[in-house]
Image (tube, rainbow, N blue to C red):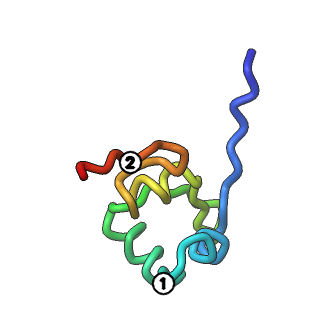
Amino acid sequence: MENTKRKLLTVREAAALIDGLSAYSLLQMCNSGQLAYFKSGNRVLITKENLFQAVFGTEKNEKVQDDN
């Protein structure tokens, strides 16, 4: 069986990955349903995949084609 363990990021860690995105904005995205998340007690946890999908519409490692 392949190891499919995913790292969960706190809201602050996720916000630090993208310039111009605040922890508050991420919480708003979670509350509005734009960003999938997990709760552990009072902590909001986000996967990198969900973060990049919600913000950019693609996963981090997916190449975006340029129509030029």
What residue is shown at x 57% (from left), y 59% (from top)?
46
Disc 2, SS: loop
Please say if 35 is above or below 7: below
Q: Is residue 22 above or below residue 66?
A: below
Q: Nearer the viewer, residue 16 or 43?
A: 16
Q: Residue 39 bears which disc, if any? A: none
Judge the density around disc 1: few (<14), some (14-19), many (≥20) Cα neighbours within 10 Å.
few
Q: Residue 54 appears in which quarter of the rendering?
A: bottom left
Left or right: 36 with respect to 46?
left
Q: Nearer the viewer, residue 11 or 67?
A: 67
Query: In the image, what residue type sits under mark 2?
Result: Val
Question: Which residue is label 2 attached to?
Answer: 64
Q: Image point 45% across, 44% down: which residue? A: 63
Residue on which disc 1 sits: 20
26 relative to 64 in the view: left or right: right
Q: Name the outermost residue toward the front.
A: 68
User: Disc 1 marks which amino acid?
Assistant: Gly
For marks 2 and 1 on the same chain, the one whose residue lies earlier in the sequence: 1
Residue at the spot 24% in from the left edge and 52% down from the top edge: 68
Left or right: residue 43 compared with residue 26: right
SS of the residue at dot 1?
Answer: loop
Name the residue nearer the viewer: 43 or 56: 56
Q: CA distance from mark 2 to mark 1?
A: 21 Å
Where residue 67 appears, as percent x and y from the top left, is 24, 49
Task: Please give the name of the residue rendered at 46% of the width and 75% of the height, measured from the top-left corner.
Answer: 27
Residue sitting farthest toward the top: 1
